[in-house]
Image (cartoon, rainbow, N blue to C red):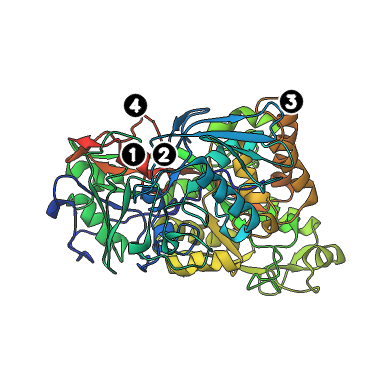
Amino acid sequence: MKNLWPKLIVAGSVLTCVIGGAASTTVGASSNPATTLTEETNVGQIFTNNFNPADSQSVSTQMATNGLSYEPLIMFNPLKTNASTPWLASSESVSPTGLSVTFVISAKAKWSNGAPITARDVANEFNALSNNASLDVFGVPSLARPATVSGNSVTLTYPTPEFSNEQAIGSVLIFPFAGDPGIPSSALITSGTQNLSASQVIGSGPYVPASYSSQLISYKYNPHWSLTPKPYVQTVNIPYYATNQAATEALIAHQLDWAGNDIPQVTRTYIAMDPSHDHFYYPPGSTVTLWFNVSPSAPDGRTDCLGDPNFRKAISMAINRSQLSSIGETGYEQPATSSSGLTPLQSAYLGSFANNLNTKGASASTVKSFLQQAGYAIDSRGYFAVSTKAASTATGLAAKTECSFSIQDPVAYSDYTEDMQLISSQLKADHVNVSAVGVSTGQWNSNISTRNFDAIIRWGAGGSNPYSQFENWLDDPANTSGSTDFGDYVNPVAQAALIKLAASQVGTAAFQTNVNTLSGIMTNDVPEAPLLYGADWDVYSTLRFTGWVTPKDPYGYPGPGGNTIALVVTHLTKA
């Protein structure tokens, strides 16, 4: 049981508008040919010449451009239930038992050097992912036996039914592995730490890196691409922006065509500048949570008290989610209303967990009473501390240890910075000692990977199937090489329920039973505290291009921050 949806890189990023500051680069859409799209997915991310799609720290992963060069078998639409577009595979079928999945590979699929993409190539990749967990950035389950090939079909067989993993398996990006004919060794993906330069990329997608510098990455059209008609967009430019202000100015000046950001007061600061061409679309796509690190590697593990589910529950009770929504997210992300963490798109599965969160937070007296009953008392400094044997056992901390932890997020993500400051202020008013720590974007990603944090605010997996959310939050990190469950929460009951959920057909009584079990774990153990229904940030201009994902035509993930980016780019036409 592993991750359903690829992680979105800029789900928490926000742009603040300060007119008059100097942009960090002058390269933009207005200075390029008509067929060049200029987009931005992440600010403050240092550009390095590493385009390895299996490396979570590569520039192509951090800037969410892997999907330009490496394509999934099927494009699934996170905005609609059971909606998909055949891509490298013309079809995906799950056996009646759920134990096997078969793909028919399109005869039109080719690598960027012209070699055909075959069922054998796909089998090689899934075999490699199954045998080397460090390569499995998609979190797909391990195979029961090597993939089998028959003509242009590849069949993957699993030890347990994988009904809920159908989308995860179909969403795997296809890139070259050992054994793929016609691919030079320099382009093969061999590990998650391998450096793959721009010139080494041989992809399965419509664009490949054309040039790289510390200020600009440029992708060019792959002439061997034939899954769609030749796209109007021939070049995709990704400039480096050091600050939110510089990126905001670029949007307003039409130097950027597309960005994946929350702009505060977007109608006033962006839309009003050119209402005929400037647009935004922020549909709720995942759940933003306060993610607790319960592993020994937490920096403040000797004081944070986060090992106690009751302490984590008190934290969740105290948070004023309405304030985070209105101030931190300027109204564009609504407060979470269910302790299960399930999104509005997944509301059919909420059951008794619907609307059970007080979005304005519990009163200080309620929080105080709850923590006192759990074994905590306010110390001489005015903060809660461990005071009973029960609390000492639950936290692993000595009596009189003052509970203290930090929330860590990138300073470049201004909304998350605002959110963590608000949470810190709210909790301190309730006698819980919490600090807000801002770090660079790159350091934050690295710290998540190494579990070097106490708590973070982070987006979730999204999708229409609750399995995707729960797997991302609860799956034992040992199963996914750390690519899920960043807080290292381990619960055998959750593991058993995840296996049963994956094996259950959506909509059945068994499926709902396991959803209820996992919702109960989220509610009572609180490995993550749901905060907001995270938006799929999408800011775009129709000055030069049309064909964008819109509320009237939600054909795919709307922003540039996902692995289905090629679906949108190849859909664009001249305005």
How far from the left and from the top, in percent, is residue 340?
65, 41
> According to the image, label 3 marks what residue?
509
Tell me which numbered mark, 2 or 1, is placed earlier along the sequence.
Answer: 2
The residue under label 3 is which amino acid type? Ala
The residue under label 1 is which amino acid type? Val
Q: Is residue 51 above or below residue 233?
A: below
Q: Secondary structure at mark 4?
A: loop
The residue under label 2 is which amino acid type? Tyr
Residue at 33% from the left image edge and 63% from the top image edge:
199
The residue under label 4 is which amino acid type? Lys
> Disc 3 versus disc 2: distance between alpha carbons?
30 Å
> Disc 2 versus disc 1: distance between alpha carbons?
8 Å
Q: Which mark is residue 557?
A: 2
In the picture provided, is 370 more to the left or to the right than 18?
Answer: right
> Disc 3 versus disc 4: distance between alpha carbons?
34 Å
Tell me which numbered mark, 1 or 3, is placed earlier along the sequence.
Answer: 3
How far from the left and from the top, in percent, is residue 56?
50, 61
Tell me which numbered mark, 3 or 2, is placed earlier along the sequence.
Answer: 3
Toward which corner of the image does residue 520 lie, by quadrant?
top right
* Furthest residue toward right: 389
> Disc 1 versus disc 3: distance between alpha carbons?
37 Å
Q: Are marks 1 and 3 in contact (CB under 8 Å)?
A: no
Q: Are marks 2 and 1 in contact (CB under 8 Å)?
A: yes
Q: Which mark is residue 102?
A: none
In the picture provided, is 77 more to the left or to the right than 465?
Answer: left
Residue at 31% from the left image edge and 64% from the top image edge:
243
Q: Secondary structure at mark 1?
A: helix
> According to the image, label 1 marks what residue?
568
Tell me which numbered mark, 1 or 4, is placed earlier along the sequence.
Answer: 4
> Disc 1 versus disc 4: distance between alpha carbons?
15 Å
